[in-house]
Image (cartoon, rainbow, N blue to C red):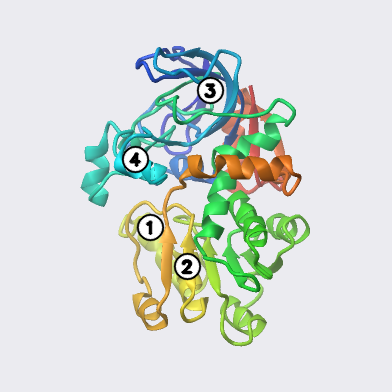
Amino acid sequence: MRAVCWNGKKDIRVETVPDPRILNPRDAIIETELSAICGSDLHLYNGNIPTVKSGDILGHEFLGRVVEVGSEVDHLRPGDRVAVPFTIACGRCFYCSREDYSFCDNSNPNAWMAERLYGFSPAGLFGYSHMLGGYAGGQAQYVRVPFADIGPFKVPPQLTAEQLLFLTDIFPTGYQAAENCGIVRGDVVAVWGCGPVGQFAIQSAYLLGAERVIAIDRIPERLEMARTRSRAVVLNYEAVDVFEELRGMTGGRGPDACIDAVGMEAHGYGLAGWYDATKHKLWLETDRPTALRQAINACRKGGTVSIPGVYGGFIDKFPIGAAFAKGLTFKMGQTHVQRYLRTLLEKIEAGAIDPSFVITHRISLEEAPRAYEMFNNKEDGCIKVVLKL
């Protein structure tokens, strides 16, 4: 089969690799209908995630049809159309029993790697390093899905693949980020980053009762999408003082909740941006936390900072004093995708949201290397790429 493979920093190739096969009675094989490139994939592309090996198949957003199931998978049949959560969960451990699926104790066969860095291991993920399981990803013609009696979610035929694809990651991720804010009606929410997750965080905040959402970015097409499609008030952080603007727009208090949908590769500016960029290049700092610092400083006293943006290691100049003095609540982590699938599917079916609005580019699998480059460099107005198989 053909698959998108990582071969080093900014070296993505489409290669012919062996077809996957059933290895465990709880496995399924999925023929991919549609896949996507996620902002998190760019962390791999840019060499910021450790334990990725040459030849690893990338991708964790994919939808397709079942072609084979293991003997212990009794709710799926060949031909079923499924969305596959990017978080792999066993469904039986302490965390899965609490619907905290991204904390699963049993789905990462390389848990010892993550434990060395983080103390404990999160769940395994598709196409996202050997530290998180070494599972082949979904930017491929076929995918082996472990724990298929828990993960793949059957989706209706009347909806298009583009409407359903983002149930696998970025729609639940944006929704969980907004839910973590504890939004009550009338709240003002600020969102850093107007990429796909940021767009879904904005729309989810409105779905959960926010009165106003303020979106912060510097890329014109992202700001325009946030304004016109997601109904946000937008700020270009290169043109205004974000802190002063947010205070002025909230009666001096600051937003009730702040969402960092940027994560570890934030583009800084001024002295702080130079400091982070230099330390990052020298590997004295693994992540660049410009957006997170702004969110902490801008959030009102007693507010919440929600972090769906991926962080991988260690950051410097973390304003813990401001967070402590203001009594902020922090909520973060990978998404418990399985928890939200039915609720969000119902919102799509009801017409409350059409997730396909974020797609700007539709490209064949064979063109994936160019798509990665374009997405990473924010060329041609690229916000979200889907790969057609």
Indicate which disc, 1 or 3, sits on the residue closer to the N terminus.
Answer: 3
Residue type marked 3: Ala
- Nearer to us of marks 1 and 3 is 3
Task: Kindly check if marks 2 and 1 are in contact, taking CB atoms under 8 A apart as contact.
Answer: no
Coordinates of residue 155 in the picture (x, y in percent): 63, 29
What residue sits 54% from the left and 15% below the top?
77
Residue underneath mark 4: 104
What kind of element bears circle 1? Answer: helix
Q: Which residue is mark 1?
A: 280
Q: Is residue 22 visible?
A: yes
Amino acid tagged 4: Cys
Residue at x 50% of width, y 21% of height:
75
Give the structural element (helix, strand or loop) at label 4: loop
Discs 4, 3 touching: Cβ within 8 Å: no
User: Label 4: few (<14), some or many (≥20) within 10 Å?
Assistant: many
Give 227 or 385, whichever is nearer the viewer: 227
Residue identified by numbered label 2: 305
- Percent position of residue 6, x then y: 44, 30
Q: Nearer the viewer, mark 2 or mark 4?
A: 4
Which is more N-terminal, label 4 or label 2?
A: 4
Estimate how packed mark 2 is, as few (under 14), some (14 to 19) or many (20 or more) residues with alpha carbons within 10 Å: many
Q: Amino acid at mark 2?
A: Val
Q: Which residue appears at 47% of the width and 55% of the height?
A: 265
Q: Which residue is mark 3?
A: 140
Q: Which mark is residue 51?
A: none
Question: What quarter of the picture does the C terminus occupy?
Answer: top right
The disc, 1 or 4, on the residue closer to the chain's N-terminal end is 4
